């Protein structure tokens, strides 16, 4: 039971200084210094370099709090620290009560003896994480990526805070999650785990309640299970006889939880009370979803399948990789995360991978995934580094894993636990073997210790040793024939994105292309003179070497040279979106053989160039809009080869579709050269080729190939389900003409409606607002000559309220044709 909330106002200072300044807890050194005007925004221009130096110093925090007799009258009084970042000593009234060294852990200390009635003082001393790593590296160097501070494997602290190929080096410190004093009498609930057994007659629940008791008095456990609408409550009470109790429930007519686009997300509330006579000693509440969820691996003609199976249904996983939302953790909030998760489902995601180089997200992250229906692929927090698996390290990470698995395991959205990011591949295919003797430690950690913990703490969730992996023990971890795959030939090796079509992975969990964020975002960290992609400031906000040049390389393969900085940003996003579309459509066409596409990466932790589809400020890049189309449950796509085109439909729904695929070969100014249609039946959860077309007779000159395109559309009755276009040359060689794009606007109570017209074929028609942010119902789409497109903006999705006139003032429109001279 909460007795004293220690969050709120504290004081802090650098240890060697004398003046204390105001601080906020939960919080951090960087954010306190920033709030008190002691440093400039570390994200601005090249401020990161100076700001980094802060992390080379030690800092301390203190506050006082009042303790009255009622606090001390509890049998047990604990200090609960839900997040300490990272190496610190904690004192109460001058007595050391805790040494902590793991940001991912929850620490609890019995403080009854050190507290006194009246004013008490708590004092936390944080040691520089950078000084610590430097010292440890001198003793025995560990391997890690070039882009981070060396030795990250020595500290259980979000690795990306030390710099990544998309994020700054700002290894902050502080009390980053809640801190409080809690009191208990007689006993308390230690943990609750709900095991589900799905039968044809309903769902059997085994509610496993562990209690800790220190009195002889009789205690009772009461469990209540409340239906999603709250209307029905099942309740059972048992008396405490042991530490572990199994309380069975049967749920008739269960309302099953489904991922986004596959069904609803009903959540049952579980309440557990521990009581003594009439007095409640402890209680806990959480929500579960009734579903079965696993990963099926079955030998087949290609090797071994790797697919999520939910409630018995194998599904094609669609989503992106999630990284920490901010390098300064106090800037994260439920509102920001909610907006991000909502953006994922708006773009038809059904899954999200929490990448292993950050931290275990807050409870609200999983709550939103439960509510919106995103399956969470949860990496454990190890990435691209070697670790020394000493007894001390082992104890530390076991505790960390238990803390986090117990916290997260009940969430309906939890899909799997994965040992680490890209470490098995580094050992099996990289150069680590020649530089380090840590390979046996790797096996002990990820293939013995952690899976054992997972099995005892969360036996109902699938464990996977690494991403990518083929099942472990260095057996071709990045094989295309089994397990999951990361493919970086496109981008890191500069291969053309058309190479994606040469690959038939079982589950693609990482692939990506970089782009720049929007101009509005770049303006937040640059001066006008910095707005050139090779300026020192723009290069400082590109963390992957000389990748600004690589973005230009990819642009040059597909598009004309953009005419100015702003257009370069736009075209960089187009190339990224085209690459991802190209890959995903191919893998969805090969549904069954491939059952997942999770692109790298969803979001950013600061403003800069990266692989993200949503930038630091939550703004949708072109890719996020493209994902909304290429992840739509019913998606039509084209596979072109010269003047041959096959048209396909992929159906990720339980409905059989009776529809029509229609196509038109057209000139840019709207003359139809050929047209046709075909009725098709698309089975549930399947992908089919509808038709194979050969235009070699019509498109017999370069001139015709450069001025004609194919528009296709799959519809069911009057409803257009999905549509697209195909060019027969690269867009840079297509002859576009002036499209005279026009917008008519209209206002309704909850939304604005835009009617857009084009005089000739327009590609990647992009809408934006100069200052405000909006999510458009469709964006960066293609338009046929003479066509009118309707696009909506929900007022709820606007970053600030706008009148119709205000909206018109800010609205901009462009297409690929406007990007060059
Ligand atoms: C993958 C990820 C990240 C990295 C990204 C881009 O390997 O796991 O470590 O940021 O590639 O290079």
Image (tube, rainbow, N blue to C red):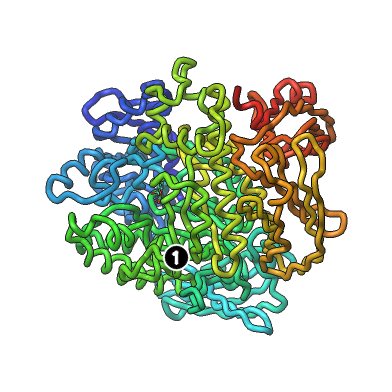
- Residue for point 44% across, 61% down: 485
Q: Position of residue 704 (x, y in %)?
A: 70, 40
Q: Position of residue 493 (x, y in %)?
A: 39, 47
Q: Is residue 484 above or below residue 774?
A: below
User: Foreground residue, 446 or 113?
Assistant: 446
Which residue matches tag 1? 480
Classify residue 368 as left or right of residue 474.
right
Q: Position of residue 651 (x, y in %)?
A: 69, 63
Find numbered disc 1 in the image and state the secondary structure of the residue it sits on. Answer: loop
- Whether residue 711 is visible, yes or no, is yes
User: Foreground residue, 260 or 529?
Assistant: 529
- Whether residue 184 is visible, yes or no, is no
- Residue for point 73% across, 70% down: 683
Q: Is residue 206 above or below residue 402?
A: below
- Residue for point 53% across, 75% down: 195
Number of marks in picture? 1
Callout 1: few (<14), some (14-19), or many (20+) C-alpha neighbours within 10 Å? many
Classify residue 342 as left or right of residue 186.
right
Which residue in the rendered view is the most extreme toward the right? 718
User: Foreground residue, 515 or 361?
Assistant: 515
Classify residue 511 as left or right of residue 266.
left
Q: Quadrant of residue 5?
A: top left
Q: Position of residue 88 (x, y in %)?
A: 27, 44
- Residue for point 67% across, 68% down: 686
**Which quadrant is home to the C terminus?**
top right
């Amino acid at each position: 039971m909460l007795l004293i909330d220690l969050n709120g106002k504290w004081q802090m200072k650098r240890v060697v200084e004398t003046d204390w300044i105001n601080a906020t807890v939960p919080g951090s050194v960087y954010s306190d210094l920033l709030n008190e005007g002691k440093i400039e925004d570390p994200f601005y221009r090249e401020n990161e370099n100076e700001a980094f130096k802060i992390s080379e110093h030690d800092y301390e925090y203190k506050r006082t709090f009042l303790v009255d007799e009622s606090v001390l009258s509890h049998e047990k009084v604990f200090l609960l620290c839900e997040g300490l970042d990272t190496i610190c000593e904690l004192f109460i009234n001058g007595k050391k009560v805790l040494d902590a060294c793991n940001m991912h852990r929850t620490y609890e200390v019995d403080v009854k003896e050190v507290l006194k009635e009246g004013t008490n003082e708590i004092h936390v001393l944080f040691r520089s994480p950078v000084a610590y790593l430097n010292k440890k590296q001198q003793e025995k160097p560990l391997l890690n990526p070039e882009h981070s501070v060396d030795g990250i494997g020595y500290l259980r602290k979000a690795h990306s805070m030390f710099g990544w190929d998309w994020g700054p080096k700002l290894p902050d410190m502080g009390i980053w999650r809640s801190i409080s004093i809690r009191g208990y009498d007689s006993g308390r609930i230690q943990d609750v785990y709900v095991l589900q057994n799905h039968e044809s007659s309903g769902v059997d629940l085994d509610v496993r309640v562990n209690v800790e008791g220190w009195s002889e008095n009789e205690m009772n456990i009461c469990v209540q299970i409340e239906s999603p609408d709250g209307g029905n409550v099942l309740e059972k009470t048992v008396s405490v006889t042991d530490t572990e109790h199994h309380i069975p429930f049967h749920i008739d007519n269960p309302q099953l939880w489904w991922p986004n686009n596959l069904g609803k997300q009903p959540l049952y509330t579980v309440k557990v009370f521990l009581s003594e006579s009439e007095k409640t000693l402890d209680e806990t509440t959480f929500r579960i979803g009734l579903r079965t969820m696993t990963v099926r691996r079955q030998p087949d003609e290609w090797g071994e399948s790797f697919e999520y199976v939910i409630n018995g249904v194998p599904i094609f996983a669609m989503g992106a990789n999630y990284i920490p939302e901010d390098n300064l953790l106090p800037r994260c909030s439920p509102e920001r995360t909610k907006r991000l998760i909502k953006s994922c489902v708006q773009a038809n995601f059904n899954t999200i991978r929490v990448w292993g180089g950050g931290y275990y997200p807050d409870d609200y992250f999983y709550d939103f995934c439960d509510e919106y229906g995103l399956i969470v692929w949860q990496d454990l927090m190890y990435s691209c580094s070697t670790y020394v698996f000493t007894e001390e390290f082992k104890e530390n990470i076991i505790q960390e894993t238990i803390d986090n698995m117990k916290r997260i395991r009940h969430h309906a959205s939890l899909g799997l636990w994965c040992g680490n990011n890209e470490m098995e591949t580094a050992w099996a295919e990289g150069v680590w073997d020649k530089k380090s003797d840590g390979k046996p430690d790797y096996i002990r950690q990820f293939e013995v210790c952690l899976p054992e913990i997972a099995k005892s703490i969360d036996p109902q969730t699938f464990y996977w040793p690494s991403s990518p992996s083929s099942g472990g023990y260095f057996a071709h971890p990045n094989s295309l024939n089994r397990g999951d795959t990361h493919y970086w030939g496109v981008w890191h090796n500069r291969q053309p994105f058309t190479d994606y079509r040469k690959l038939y992975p079982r589950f693609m969990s990482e692939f990506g292309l970089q782009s720049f964020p929007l101009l509005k975002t770049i303006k937040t960290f640059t001066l006008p003179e910095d707005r050139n992609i090779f300026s020192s400031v723009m290069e400082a906000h590109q963390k992957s070497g000389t990748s600004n040049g690589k973005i230009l390389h990819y642009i040059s393969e597909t598009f004309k040279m953009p005419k100015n900085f702003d257009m370069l940003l736009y075209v960089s996003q187009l190339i990224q979106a085209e690459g991802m579309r190209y890959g995903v459509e191919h893998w969805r066409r090969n549904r069954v053989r491939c059952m997942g596409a999770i692109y790298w990466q969803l979001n950013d932790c600061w403003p800069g160039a990266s692989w993200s589809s949503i930038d630091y400020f939550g703004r949708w890049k072109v890719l996020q809009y493209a994902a909304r189309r290429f992840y739509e449950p019913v998606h039509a796509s084209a596979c072109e080869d010269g003047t041959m085109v096959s048209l396909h439909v992929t159906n990720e729904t339980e409905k059989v579709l009776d529809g029509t695929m229609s196509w038109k070969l057209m000139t840019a100014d709207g003359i139809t050269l050929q047209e046709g249609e075909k009725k098709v039946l698309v089975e549930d959860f399947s992908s089919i080729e509808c038709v194979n077309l050969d235009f070699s007779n019509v498109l017999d000159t370069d001139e015709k190939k450069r001025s004609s395109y194919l528009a296709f559309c799959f519809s069911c009755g009057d409803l257009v389900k999905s549509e697209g276009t195909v060019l027969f040359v690269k867009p840079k060689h297509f002859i576009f003409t002036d499209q005279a794009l026009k917008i008519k606007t209209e206002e309704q109570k909850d939304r604005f409606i835009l009617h857009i017209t084009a005089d000739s074929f327009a590609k990647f028609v992009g809408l934006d607002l100069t200052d405000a942010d909006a999510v458009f119902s469709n964006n960066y789409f293609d338009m046929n000559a003479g066509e009118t497109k309707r696009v909506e903006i929900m007022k709820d999705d606007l970053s600030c309220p706008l009148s119709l006139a205000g909206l018109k003032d800010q609205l901009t429109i462009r297409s690929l044709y406007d990007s060059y001279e």
